[in-house]
């Protein structure tokens, strides 16, 4: 079969990004209001739900075992289908146990997909084009989110659609797009045969450390920043959707430029800028008393996190090309070690002092800043770190 000009790995990554974003954005935007209104969740239950959501991420290292029998591209399709199904049925189980189970199903698909997507992206994209294209993928996800949140605002405020209907629509779109990708795109081959066993290399230690801290820090934003808007400032579903619209409008406008910026100034400077910004944002979260200022911090928070693509491009520059698939799974597991514990543990801290949760986020951002300063200006195989270099590069 003749391949058409639009049937490229980059375009497939873009459609994958849209499919996953539609499902996950629908789930995430409704979550806080849904669990409070339908299941009477407090911060403790929300924290437990988010910890359950991160368990599949912690088990992402098992992806390399699945790859012994399934090609990565097909594995991505299966994962997206599971994500879509998990979201589609979420609204029909408004109980503690029901929400925990549907969240786990959705999360299995989401985290396996993200693991495979990272591996495929670093295999299919060259070192020179990776920062720009990864930024474009973030922008595409933000544009898809804009459409989702616009729909959510209309669905709830104008047409009064039920939670069940909205979840069903969002999940079904993901499944339909997955079927389209499976039928429309050829099976792309990687330039380098990937290792099909688990491995950790000593010379990647800084990448592992940055990934671990990124997972810990991300939970403060993903779990508690949005919950703050609903619990403290009384945001409705339409308010949350409007906030997400503004947030993703900024990301759509700037994410592509952020990717180009990382390519231009390098990973060391990009991550330094991100972590200094996050120190300020998390500290401000702890003391904010105005809903509009909180919304502004939320947008800034997400923009700074877009710079985290520099961690992926740093790894691409220092890694053996055959390590991409195996290391993607290991990295996601490392990323989720703290993520499994923090939501539940910090949910209990939240009951005593929400400010303390965000100040701990400040501490995490500071540790990440120290780690980022250890990245060389020109990272490559054999020049992975400034301090703590492994003598034998092949280890």
Image (spheres, rainbow, N blue to C red):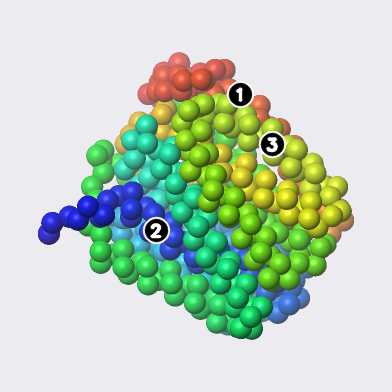
Which of the 4 image quarters holds residue 226?
Answer: bottom right
Measured Cα–Cα span from mark 3 to mark 2:
30 Å
Q: Which residue is at 25% across, 59% downward?
A: 185
Local crowd at mark 3 within 10 Å, few (<14), some, or many (≥20)? some
The quadrant in which the N terminus is found is bottom left
Mark 1 and mark 3 lie on one chain; the one further toward the N terminus is: 3
Q: Which residue is at 61% across, 83% downward?
A: 159
Which of the 4 image quarters holds residue 4?
Answer: bottom left
Which mark is on residue 45?
A: none
Location of mark 3 (residue): 277
Measured Cα–Cα span from mark 1 to mark 3:
15 Å
The answer to which of 262 and 50 lies nearer the viewer is 262
The answer to which of 302 and 318 lies nearer the viewer is 302
Mark 2 and mark 1 lie on one chain; the one further toward the N terminus is: 2
217, above or below 113, in the image: above
Location of mark 2 (residue): 16
335, above or below 38, in the image: above
Does residue 197 show up?
no
SS of the residue under disc 2: helix
Please state the horizontal and vertical placement of residue 330, each as a whole percent of the image. Answer: 47, 44
Q: Which residue is at 33% across, 55% downward?
A: 12
Please state the horizontal and vertical placement of residue 158, each as a whole percent of the image. Answer: 63, 80
Location of mark 1 (residue): 373
SS of the residue under disc 1: loop
Position of 320 compared to 240: left or right? left
SS of the residue under disc 3: helix
Please state the horizontal and vertical placement of residue 43, each as a whole percent of the image. Answer: 77, 63
């Amino acid at each position: 079969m003749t391949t058409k000009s639009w049937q490229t790995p980059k375009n497939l990554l873009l459609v994958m990004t849209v499919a996953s974003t539609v499902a996950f954005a629908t789930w995430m935007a409704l979550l806080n209001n849904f669990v409070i209104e339908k299941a009477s969740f407090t911060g403790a239950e929300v924290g437990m739900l988010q910890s359950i959501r991160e368990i599949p991420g912690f088990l992402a290292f098992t992806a390399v075992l699945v790859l012994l029998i399934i090609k990565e591209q097909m594995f991505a399709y299966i994962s997206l289908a599971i994500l879509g199904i998990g979201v589609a049925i979420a609204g029909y189980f408004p109980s503690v146990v029901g929400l925990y189970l549907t969240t786990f199903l959705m999360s299995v698909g989401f985290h396996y997909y993200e693991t495979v997507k990272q591996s495929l992206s670093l295999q299919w994209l060259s070192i020179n084009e990776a920062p720009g294209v990864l930024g474009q993928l973030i922008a595409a996800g933000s544009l898809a989110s804009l459409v989702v949140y616009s729909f959510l605002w209309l669905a709830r405020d104008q047409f009064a659609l039920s939670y069940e209907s909205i979840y069903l629509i969002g999940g079904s779109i993901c499944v339909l797009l997955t079927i389209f990708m499976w039928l429309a795109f050829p099976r792309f081959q990687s330039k380098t045969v990937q290792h099909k066993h688990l491995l950790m290399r000593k010379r990647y230690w800084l990448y592992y450390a940055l990934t671990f801290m990124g997972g810990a820090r991300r939970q403060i934003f993903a779990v508690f920043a949005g919950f703050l808007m609903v619990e403290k400032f009384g945001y409705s579903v339409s308010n949350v959707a409007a906030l997400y619209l503004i947030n993703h409008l900024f990301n759509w406008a700037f994410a592509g430029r952020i990717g180009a910026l990382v390519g231009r100034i390098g990973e060391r400077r990009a991550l330094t800028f991100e972590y200094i910004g996050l120190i300020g944002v998390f500290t401000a979260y702890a003391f904010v008393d105005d809903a509009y200022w909180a919304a502004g911090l939320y947008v800034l928070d997400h923009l700074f996190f877009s710079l985290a693509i520099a961690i992926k491009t740093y790894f691409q520059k220092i890694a053996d090309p055959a390590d991409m698939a195996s290391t993607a799974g290991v990295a996601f597991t490392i990323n989720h070690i703290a993520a499994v514990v923090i939501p539940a543990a910090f949910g209990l801290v939240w009951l005593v002092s929400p400010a303390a949760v965000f100040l701990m986020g400040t501490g995490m951002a500071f540790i990440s800043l120290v780690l980022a300063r250890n990245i060389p200006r020109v990272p490559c195989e054999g020049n992975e770190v400034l301090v703590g270099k492994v003598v034998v590069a092949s280890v």
